[in-house]
Structure formats: C-alpha cells, structure tokens
Image (tube, rainbow, N blue to C red):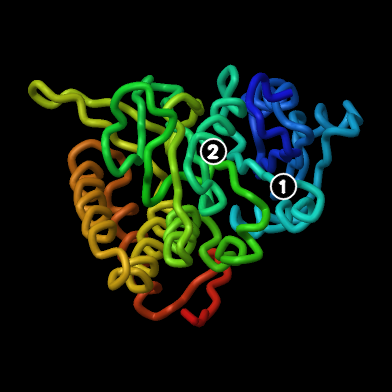
Amino acid sequence: MYGNCKYKESICAIIVTYNPDQRLLINCNQLIKQVDSIIIVNNGPNNSIINDIVRRKSKRFKIICLDKNIGLAAALNIGISYVKKDYQWVITFDQDSIITESFVHYMLEAYNSYPNNESLAIVAPFYKDQTTGIIQTFRDHKAEGNVLYAKTTTTNTSGNLIGTHVFDKVGLFREYFFIDYIDKEFCLRCMEKGYTIIESTKACLLHNVGEPRQYKLLWKTPLASNHPPSRRYYITRNRIIVYRQYYRIFPKWVLGDIYIMIKEIIKILVYEKEKSSKYYWMLRGLRDALLNKMGSVEKIAIFSMK
C-alpha cells in the first residue's frame, strides 16, 4: 500500500466534519487508496455528503454521528479513542483538506529518514492554499538540498501523522479549546514532553485557512484570512491561554506568534469586512482568557490550567 516505504504499519485517517461539501468526497476517494481505514466524526446532523458516504457501507469507512457540534478537539478525541488500540498511526484531517498523490508515502518516508524516529510525535505536511496557491510551511529553518524533512515547533491539525502511543504519553487534544489553537497547544505539549515534530518536504496538503484572499498594496500582495467574528473569538482566547501556559518554555515561539497576531489585527483594519464585530469578539476572547472561561462561545465553562 505504501509503495517502497519500508514501514508498513496500519494507518487510520480521522476526519472531523460539520456540514461538509464536495471536498470531503474528493479527499475520501484519495485517502482510501493510501490508508487502511477512514473514521469520520460528524459534528452535527447529516447532510447529503455524509449520507452519500453512509450509503457506500464500506468496511473501511466508519461514521460516528454526533447529535450536536461538540467542537473539533472533542470530535478528534472521540475518533482517536475509537481506533488507537488497533492502529499504530492516525492522520487527522479537517473536512476541507485534500491530500495529493503519494501523500502518505512521503509522510512515512520522512519518518523513516529521521534518526531516532521513536522520538517523533508528529510528521506534518506542508500546505498549499486551494484558493490562492500560496505555499505555507512551519519549518524552523529552510530545508536545503534533497532532505526529506525539516524540524518545526508547531503546525496545523490537518494532515498530521501521529503515532497512537503519543497520546498515551502526552494526552489527547484540549477539549475546552473547542476549536483553534488545539494544534499549537498539542504541539507545544509534545515538545515539552521531549518529543520532536518534523515537516515533510514532499507531502503537500491542499488546505484553506478561513476564506483567504490576496489584496494589492503597492508592490506587495498581502493575504488576509477573513475569518468570521466568532472564529476571531476562539483564536484570540485560545492563543492567549497558550501564551500563558508556555511562554516560559517556548518564549521565542510565543513572541513570533504575538507578531503574527499584530499583523492579523492590522489586516482586519485595512482589508476585512465586519471590522467592529471582529474586534468586539477579539476583546471578548481576551477577557474570557484572562478570566479562564473556556468551552464553546454558547456555553462557557471555567477551566483549570493544571
């Protein structure tokens, strides 16, 4: 199944959905050629796309339907808990991501090429925006030559190859985050426990962050994500929580992310719509982070940072 890659342990893809579109079908059709099985955790009522997958009744597909949207982290945890005793690897996906040819082969190739690969927590892909074609990587240093991987500190959730034993060591995703920064927090937690994260230089995932759009400013073409106001709440709240938890251990990463946050604030002011609403929800997110209020925006819960 994995070409010439010497490591051929079983792999299960876990996809969290919420009212998915045709991209889910495209990704499933590609994934089933490269992994052993697919678990879909549907965060809400079924739509036509989910029903289409249900009708296939394939033994290699499993759909877990939830009554309501419990958040990305909790849904991922359900999928991971369901399969981690039977599979050595999981690959986590958002519903709008699409793998490219030989994606899994390249991910395993990166894993096998890393010395002392038992210390690896995550093998991540690099990302190509489906709208703009812009390539996004999270590498700590530029990869030169024909190397198969580069080290990174954090990455996105979608497309990550994770050994199931890692969850026994570091725990599952933080469910009180609901959505946004669950990936960054999990990566930093893995690093804190002594694990390493690498990014494949060959595995490309087609993936959108928000509703990206490029703008023209003099000789530059800045990219704005155009996240809706409610997402700005989660992004702001959760990133502040991450800063508070990890600034002593990873000060360089925190400073870098603060710089990204400042650029996002400016881009909202200059380019995006619903400016006042987005700033309102960002301020509310900041307030709730300082008050340790977590959970979904509809039902905030007090949490402990321990």
Residue drawn 74% across the image and 41% down it? 40
Residue 38 position by quadrant? top right
* Secondary element at tag 2: helix
Q: Mark number for residue 131?
A: none
* Residue that numbered label 2 is attached to: 111
**Residue at point 83%, 35% (across, down):** 61
Residue positioned 46% across, 44% down in the render? 156
Q: Is residue 245 above or below residue 149?
A: below
Identify which residue, 275 or 91, lies in the foreground. 91
Q: Position of residue 267 (x, y in %)?
A: 22, 42
Of residues 270 and 141, the one nearer the viewer is 141
Q: Amino acid at mark 2?
A: Tyr
Label 1 amino acid? Answer: Gln
The location of residue 163, given as percent across then percent down, is: 63, 49
Quarter occupied by the N terminus:
top right
Residue 287 placement, left or right of 202:
left
Residue located 67% across and 44% down the image: 90
Find the residue positioned furthest to the front.
115
The Cα atoms of the two marked residues, 1 and 2, are separated by 13 Å
Q: Position of residue 105 (x, y in %)?
A: 60, 26
Is label 1 in contact with label 2 (beta carbons under 8 Å)?
A: no
Residue 32 in view here: yes
Q: Secondary structure at mark 1?
A: loop
Tell which circle, 1 or 2, labels the residue nearer the N-terminal end: 1
The outermost residue toward the left is 218
Is residue 81 shown left or right of residue 230? right
In the image, is residue 231 above or below residue 168?
above
Residue found at the very far top of the displayed protein: 101
Q: Is residue 44 left or right of residue 271?
A: right
Q: Determine crowd level at label 1: few under 14, some 14-19, many 20+ residues with C-alpha closer than 10 A.
A: some
Which one is nearer the viewer's eye here, 138 or 178?
Answer: 138
Query: Which residue is label 1 attached to?
Result: 88
